[in-house]
Image (cartoon, rainbow, N blue to C red):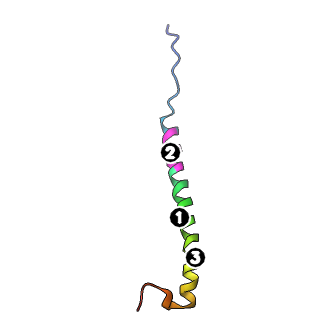
Amino acid sequence: MSTDVQEKDNFWLWVGGAVLAVVVTVVVIKSSEHDKFETSAKAILEDPANSAYKK
């Protein structure tokens, strides 16, 4: 009889945690980029001449 205790494999727990961390990081970065350009978007709506994309 063997008295070896097998340690539980936490591989998928680590993979899930890493994926969750990447998703949260992407959401935070995208949210801050949206806020950064919000004032520019308002200025372009007021006067389209402020845009770099001239028609």
Q: Which residue is mark 2?
A: 18
Badge 2 element: helix
Q: Quadrant of the rendered structure where residue 37 is?
A: bottom right
Does label 2 or label 1 sit earlier along the sequence?
2
Please tell me which residue lies in front, 22 or 33.
33
In the image, which is nearer the foreground, mark 2 or mark 3?
A: 3
Binning the other alpha carbons within 10 Å of mark 1 as few (below 14), some (14 to 19) or many (20 upward) gives few
Residue type at numbered disc 1? Lys
Residue 38's tag is 3
- The residue lying at 56 percent from left, 71 percent from top is 36
Whole-number angstrom distance, CA of label 3 to CA of label 1: 13 Å
Q: CB of mark 2 within 8 Å of CB of mark 1? A: no
Q: Residues within 10 Å of mark 2 (few under 14, many from 20)?
A: few
Pointer 1: what residue? 30
- Determine whether the residue tagged by mark 3 lies in a helix, strand or loop: helix
Counting residues from the start of the chain, the first of labels 3 and 1 encountered is 1
Decide: is 41 above or below 1: below
Residue 52 vertical placement versus 19 (above, below) = below
